[in-house]
């Protein structure tokens, strides 16, 4: 399990190396990333590592409240709370994994995260990427993710 930080140069390289159409999800991700990272610093510290849930590749997220006040967060907006809570790009030796577009309900729940408190949860990759388990049979899988103003890269080892 490896975790890499500071992915902006890698993400820029990945997107510069691919020809992107205006209606392409990766172009939309890039635009959202630019928009989200132009604002003030977030009150959340977010990190991700690789894991497996019932044999399926996943990201294990930690979200910590770095502010001095409690934060009320919609459960569906946590990184693992909804298929569309985060943006993902999965890369294997054969290229980018094709996206899935599941129907996912936002729900109505909220959680209060006290100052300094941490929540953790898993985001199973096959809910939005086609064939991550199969890709890991041939090569490592690089997952570029973003959540609000935070982004990262997680490498899942070939299995």
Image (cartoon, rainbow, N blue to C red):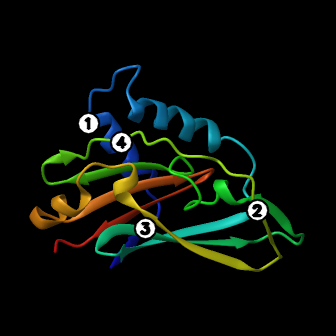
As drawn, which residue projects farthest toward the top? 22
Q: In front: mark 1 or mark 4?
A: 4
Callout 1–callout 3 Cβ contact below 8 Å? no
Q: Which residue is labeled 3 in the image? A: 59
Q: Earlier in the sequence, mark 1 or mark 2?
A: 1
Q: x and y percent of residue 115 in the render?
A: 83, 76
Q: At numbered mark 1, what does the secondary structure look like: helix, strand or loop?
A: helix
> Quick one: label 3 or label 2, which is nearer the N terminus?
2
Q: In the image, which is nearer the foreground, mark 3 or mark 2?
A: 3
The residue tagged 4 is: 100
Separation (CA) of disc 3 from disc 2: 21 Å
Q: Which one is earlier in the sequence, the residue at label 1 or at label 4?
A: 1
Query: Residue tagged by mark 2?
Result: 43
**Residue contact between numbered discs 4 and 2, judged by CB atoms under 8 Å:** no
Q: CA distance from mark 1 to mark 3?
A: 25 Å
- In space, the residues marked 1 and 4 are separated at their CA atoms by 22 Å
> Residue 17 bears which disc, if any?
1
Residue 44: x %, y % from top left:
70, 64
Q: Quick check: 151 above or below 118?
A: above
| Mark 4 and mark 2: Cα distance apart in space | 30 Å
Q: Earlier in the sequence, mark 1 or mark 3?
A: 1
| Category of crowding for the residue at label 1, using alpha-carbon neighbours closer than 10 angstroms: few (below 14), some (14–19), many (at least 20) | few
């Amino acid at each position: 399990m490896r975790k890499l930080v500071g992915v902006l140069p890698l993400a820029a390289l990945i997107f510069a190396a691919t020809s992107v159409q205006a209606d392409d999800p990766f172009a939309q991700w890039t635009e959202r990333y630019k928009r989200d990272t132009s604002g003030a610093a977030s009150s959340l510290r977010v990190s991700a590592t690789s894991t497996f849930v019932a044999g399926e590749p996943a990201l294990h997220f930690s979200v910590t409240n770095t502010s001095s006040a409690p934060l009320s967060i919609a459960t569906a907006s946590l990184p693992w709370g909804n298929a569309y809570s985060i943006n993902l790009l999965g890369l294997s030796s054969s290229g980018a994994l094709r996206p899935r577009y599941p129907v996912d309900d936002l729900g109505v729940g909220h959680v209060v995260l006290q100052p300094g408190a941490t929540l953790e949860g898993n985001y199973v990759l096959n809910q939005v990427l086609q064939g991550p388990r199969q890709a890991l049979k041939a090569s490592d899988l690089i997952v570029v993710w973003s959540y609000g103003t935070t982004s990262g890269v997680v490498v899942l080892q070939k299995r």
